[in-house]
Amino acid sequence: MHDMFKRYGTGLTTMILLVTAFWILILLILPNLTMFESSFRPYLPVTEVGGPRDVYSFANYGRILGAHTDLSVLGITFEVPVRVKVFILTIYYSAVVTLITFALAYPLAYYLAKIVSPKSLPTLFLLLFVPLWVSEILRSFAWFIILAFKGPLNVALMSLGIIDSEIRWIAGFSPVIIGLVYTYVLFMLFPLYNSMQSLDSNQIEAAEDLGSPWWRTHWRVILPHAKPGIASGAVMVFMLSAGSLLVPSLLGSTTSGWFTQTIQGVMLEEADWNTGAAFAFLLLIVCTLFVSLMMRVFGVRLSDIAK
Amino acid sequence: MSAGIDLDNVVCDFGSFRAVDHVNVSIQPGEFFSFLGPSGCGKTTILRMISGFIEPTGGVIRIGGKDVRGQRPNQRPTALIFQNLALFPLMPIWENIAFGLEVRGVNKATRRKRAEELLALVDLPGAADKMVSQLSGGQKQRVAIARALAVEPSVMLLDEPLSALDLKLRQHMRAELRAIQKRTGVTFIYITHDQGEALAMSDRVGVMSQGRLQQVSNPRDIYNNPVNGFVASFVGENNVLTGPVAAPTGGFAVMETPHGRFRARIADGVSGQGVKLFVRPEHMRFSDSPTAENSTPVTVTEVAFEGNFISVHAQSDSGMTFLSELRNDGSAPIPAVGTRLHVSFDPAVAAILPDASIARG
Amino acid sequence: MHKTRDLLGHVYMTAFLIYLLVPLLVMGGAAFNDSKLPTIVPWVGFTDRWFIDLWNDTRVWIAFRNTILVALGVVALAVPIGTAGAILINSISGRWRATLYGLMVAPILIPGVVIGISTLLFWNNFNVGAGLHLSVLGQVSYIASFVMLLVLARLQSFDAGLEEAALDLGASHSQVMRRILLPHLYPAIGAGAAIAFFQSIENFNVTLFTRGGQDTLTVYVFSKVRSGITPTINALALLLILFTLGLAIWWELTRRRKARIEAARAAEARRAEEAMA
Ligand SMILES: Nc1ncnc2c1ncn2[C@@H]1O[C@H](COP(=O)(O)OP(=O)(O)OP(=O)(O)O)[C@@H](O)[C@H]1O
Ligand SMILES: [Mg+2]
């Protein structure tokens, strides 16, 4: 701190500190604390705020246990609250999306990092970047068109004779997964590529030279090296998926609730901000746990994940 | 215009590590003064204290007689040339040079004119509108000098400015720097770990080791009359002999070594253990028979032709290898490998010296 | 021996690019199809009426204006905030640095829903109601992180010796900032501004909770898709894509031109070096 005053002078340093404090305190910490605090307070008419009924409780969190429904896991059926089910399925399908993007992106990252000639890399990257420049809503909208009942996908499949009659794609979780994978696969690809690219090709050749079959080379040499990239990609894709509201709203149906949609309903339709805060806080907790888990499993730090 | 600098018991600590230890020296106005010493001995730290980037832990620094403690770098009449030059890569050459004037509010036309003048002074006309990345190492060097001169400093501080250049260019720039210093009359404080550079360019040299100033003198003196073993062995090469020393008489003393008895100069107050006898290779003479004193029988083991001189390695019967350098001008016969000879030196050119003065903590 | 592997790689790469780009083409193509529903099958006929409809839709224009206003606000705040954060991080060390860095990158990972709700609740305490101003603040809280990361990366290639050199030549701290540090950071600041602008334009989650009834383009498209769509949305999408793509290409070309200039300069320096020897 002393060094900084010396380096930038008193005036500038004070300004830098104030601006950063505004960001960290006013835009980040205090709003989240407010949300945390509100989540324990009841939803009351304005006149009663601060009144005798305005006491802290876990009631808002309890509201996740509302109406019940059935959930089958491995053939066993449980009766669970609807919102809990949505919550669990959101996490589950976000993990599925993460796995699918990894499966899709891994070979591609390897191809870009180690196989393709460096000369064609800039062009390939320019093409890969195009969807990133297109906003998320338009990317989901594109699939909304493609997956429509009388849309291009059904027409194409039928004219190829693969199916006899239209398939209703927009049903259940499949379209949501398709949309999420399409929207976020690049967030898996780029970190993977970055980490693989820093692997010395000689290591791969040495492994092959020692008689290692291709799958073992990947398992023992390439995958371990790509760990930070995997962690970073997994965190990005999972967070974006679990936090996505656009894709499930555009491509989902009544049978595919996403937890963000639950929050949206509570916040904007019921206008119950306190319960909304509680649910948002639950989402934040899950995401934080997931990040910590990834950091633990892959042995990486936050600074490896960001970037 | 140019100012002198006094360092008065200057100390600089980094935590518990003492980088500069009680340095005392008075640098005259208009002098070309070099600090010479091995890497890490505290040279840069001294320079950064003079320019104001580091406050000394103790002692006083005076520039032009005025105590500058507490003055910030931009308030001191010094200009620093950085080890890596630190030219501003995003400005054209002329803006680099005129930057010091720009921040002083000098108008653009004057700045431009002054930049052109300085470019002419450092022998780089026509480079005004180029970018830094277009210049060669030597050209950047000149720009850095011009930029420092532009603020008309009383003192120029140069931190190993030639270390990035190749040998030939370095030799050339030595002369150039010296010429610029004479032309401008500004006090130059020059830092280097290259003894050749220090000896060739400076009016006086201060030799440093482990934060302490070992000797301050003119180059000739530093080379011919080093005050201690560190200075002797850091500047130039030596044959070094060790052994007990008898009581001095008339400024000379005799050292008993396993290779014979040798007499050499000794300063007052030097005695006892930890002293060594130093004699330069160019002072070693060969003869067929023993001389009156300071001689020992040897066998020539290696003769290397170095161009302007010939270096001869000769091993004494007691196992010590003596190095001798003979001038390649025919004044002395060049011995052949395997020849049995006697090697000797004049007591007046050899010195018995104490070790370096080391930190008192 | 690697032939099959390479061939598979090429095939997969091509398939992946098709997978990425075809949906966008389908969406763009539908903007020209003279069909009430946005689709390319069946192809009814070429038309430009969706673009004309779009032009005449006042709600789009309002949403467009709002989007731009919010984006400009976000850029105006996120760029200085992110830059200040990066400079701060870059000049401190130790535990404080790690903590602050964590706080500064965390917003990237926080779900937009959470940011939106927390912003709304916090400002509500001060009787600041929902509206685009809150959208700006909410978006800034995480978009500043992107700017911070970009500027920090650039700062790490900065030679602090340049600041000292300028100080030594008599510059004041603010002159050093204006003439030395900021010019070095401009490329990153420019990139940060661009990212901030586009992130803001496409933001949905934060905006949805903070907008207070006002439309931005994303919210507008969203509401249109849910309630009876016409291909005007496709027309809008196509224009947006072309606009961002145009900017991206311009950016890339500028970058390449700069690289060429730098290479030419380095070559000249080499020649000068050789001429001396
Ligand atoms: N800011 C600092 N903090 C701690 N130690 C330092 C600092 N600056 C320098 N030192 C130490 O002080 C000693 C002297 O450093 P200085 O840079 O003055 O050496 P130098 O003689 O210029 O060496 P070189 O020839 O390598 O440039 C070194 O051991 C160095 O590690
Ligand atoms: Mg140094």
Image (cartoon, rainbow, N blue to C red):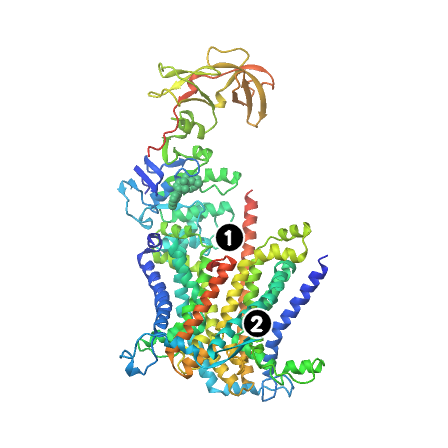
Q: Is residue C33 above or below residue B11?
A: below
User: Is A274 on the left or on the right of A182, as rendered?
Assistant: left
Q: Is residue A303 above or below residue B281?
A: below
Q: Is mark 2 within 8 Å of ligand 1?
A: no
Label 2 crowd (10 A; few <14 / some 14-19 / many >=20): many
Decide if residue B4 is in sight here: no
Q: In percent of the image, x 36 and y 17: which residue is there?
A: B251
Asked where in the image residue B229 lies, by quadrant, the reply is: top left
Say the numbered circle drawn on residue A181.
2
> For this rendering, which residue is in front, B44 or B317?
B317
Q: Is residue B338 above or below residue B153?
A: above
The residue tagged 1 is B133
> For this rendering, which residue is in front, B26 or C187?
C187
Asked where in the image residue B13 lies, by quadrant, the reply is: top left
**Picture coordinates of residue C173, whole percent (x, y):** 34, 56
**Picture coordinates of residue A268, whole percent (x, y):** 41, 82
Q: In percent of the image, x 33 and y 20: which residue is there?
A: B268
Q: Secondary structure at mark 1?
A: helix
**Picture coordinates of residue B352, whole percent (x, y):** 40, 21
Quadrant in which the C terminus of chain B appears: top left
User: Is A171 on the left or on the right of A280, as rendered?
Assistant: right
> For this rendering, which residue is in front, B217 or A277?
A277
The disc numbered 2 marks a residue on which chain? A
The mark tally for this picture is 2
- Disc 1 marks which amino acid? Ser
Between the residue at mark 1 and the residue at mark 2, the CA separation in whole angstroms equals 46 Å
Q: Is residue B226 above or below residue A55?
A: above
User: Is B139 on the left or on the right of C39, as rendered?
Assistant: left
**Picture coordinates of residue A303, whole percent (x, y):** 47, 59
The disc numbered 1 marks a residue on which chain? B
Q: In this rendering, do the residues under marks 1 and 2 share a single chain?
A: no
- Disc 2 marks which amino acid? Val
